[in-house]
Amino acid sequence: MSMTEAVMAFGKHAGMPISKLPSGYLWWLATKAEHIKEPMKSAILAEHNKRLESMWIDDDFDLWPQEF
């Protein structure tokens, strides 16, 4: 963990680095982002987007539904 890594400031995972949050909880937080203040909001959305991008990095189109 770097010195500048954001840490969860509230809730069940308070004190945990944002990068270590369970994906389901991170997704839920991202859906509530409009209610979260900066800089926590940006840190949550950045980690959420990073995880989403990593899911598609291989361009594995075999996982897409057949109609695509």
Image (cartoon, helix red, strand yellow):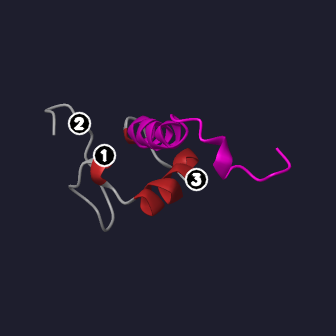
On the image, the x and y values in percent for residue 7 come to: 25, 46
Instruction: Calculate the distance from the C-alpha at mark 2 to the C-alpha at mark 1.
Output: 8 Å
Name which of mark 1 and mark 3 comes first in the sequence: 1
Q: Which residue is mark 1?
A: 19
Q: What count of labels does the image hold?
A: 3
Q: Mark 1: few, some, or many residues within 10 Å (few <14, many ≥20)?
A: many
Q: Which residue is mark 2?
A: 5
Point out which mark residue 1 bears: none
Which residue lies at the image location 45% right of the left edge and 37% below the top edge?
50
Q: Mark 2: few, some, or many residues within 10 Å (few <14, many ≥20)?
A: few
Indicate the secondary structure of the residue bearing disc 3.
helix
Image: magenta residue range: 41-68
Image marks 2 and 3: residues in contact by CB distance under 8 Å = no
On the image, the x and y values in percent for residue 13 come to: 28, 62
Which residue lies at the image location 52% right of the left edge and 49% below the top edge?
30
Q: Is residue 20 magenta?
A: no
Tell me which amino acid carries mark 1. Ser
Instruction: Calculate the distance from the C-alpha at mark 1 to the C-alpha at mark 3.
Output: 17 Å
Q: Which residue is mark 3?
A: 31
Query: Which residue is at the far right?
Result: 67
Quadrant assignment for the C terminus: top right
On the image, the x and y values in percent for residue 5 come to: 23, 36
